[in-house]
Amino acid sequence: MELVNRTFCSGLIPQFLKSSVPQILSSSILHILLLLTVLSAPLKAQENLDSLAMVWARGSFGQLYELLSIPNDAHFPEDIEENVRWCEKAFASRGFSFKRLETETVPLLLAELPHREGLPTVLAYLQLDGQPVDPAHWFQEDPFKPVLKEQAPQGGWEEIPWSRLEGELNPDWRIFARSASDAKGPVMMFLTALDALRMMDKPLPYNLKVIM
């Protein structure tokens, strides 16, 4: 399983990059698994982290679709504003407080969990903005309308219903959308890992701050 930044889930994959296209579903599951182990204290050996990551990955696709549907061209501050608002709501619902750090261009968002004395603090960085995109070069209706695709027998990719993600997952499927890897996918993986730890009642062994 591999993750290739900037080519992950792109809608226009040049021939020379096709061998580098990663596996969206297996990569999502792998990274949720890695985040679970990094974010938490050591888990009991009998806990099946692979199964846990699969369950939580499946439950995250709806929010991922929602986030990918928000345009995030860094040249348009109003686009970034919508992404910041989405993250404010998403992090607040998970117990984070947040504040905006104003800059000369667009604001940064700083979110943090309640401080606990005696613990170290970890600062994580997530990215919300993206590069400009030319919809004419994408083989789908809209680069900001995520679609699920599978490899066509004759080569290339063909769209399949998004609802297929509710059934058995095929690690060779791809989600095509702008900024799916660079860098909204990691945002959703991060949130999903936090959700899983909370449901397992696994407190973080440190204070956590996130800047976006």
Image (cartoon, rainbow, N blue to C red):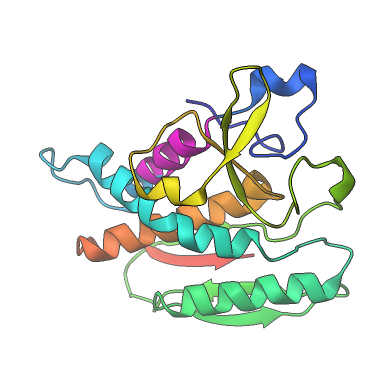
Query: Horizontal placement of 192 versus 18: left or right?
Result: left
Q: Residue at x 51, y 34 (%)?
A: 173
Residue 205 in view: no
Quarter residue 181 falls in: top right
- Above or below 9: residue 61: below
Prevailing SS of the magenta stretch? helix
Relative placement, left or right, of 17 versus 1 is right
Foreground pick, 195 / 166: 166
In the rendered image, is residue 144 in sight? yes
List x then y, in percent, for residue 21: 63, 27
Image coordinates for residue 134, horizontal then vertical, percent: 88, 48
Q: Is residue 12 above or below residue 161?
A: above
| Image vertical order of residue 70 relative to residue 155, above or below | below
Which residue occupies the foreground of this view, 93 or 120?
Answer: 93
Residue sitting at x 63%, y 52%: 146
Q: Residue furthest left?
A: 46
In the rendered image, residue 32 lying in the magenta stretch gets the answer yes
Q: Quadrant of residue 105?
A: bottom right
Q: Along the horizontal axis of the image, is 41 left or right of 162?
A: left
Q: Check residue 60 for magenta coloring.
A: no
What x and y, as percent, mark residue 44? 13, 44
Nearer-the-camera pick, 60 or 85: 60
**Residue at x-position 35% and y-position 42%:** 33
* Residue stretch in magenta: 23-34
Label total for image: 0
Residue for point 20% across, 64% down? 201
Q: Is residue 81 above or below residue 195?
A: below
The percent position of residue 165, horizontal first and vertical second, equals: 42, 47
Image quarter of the C terminus:
bottom right
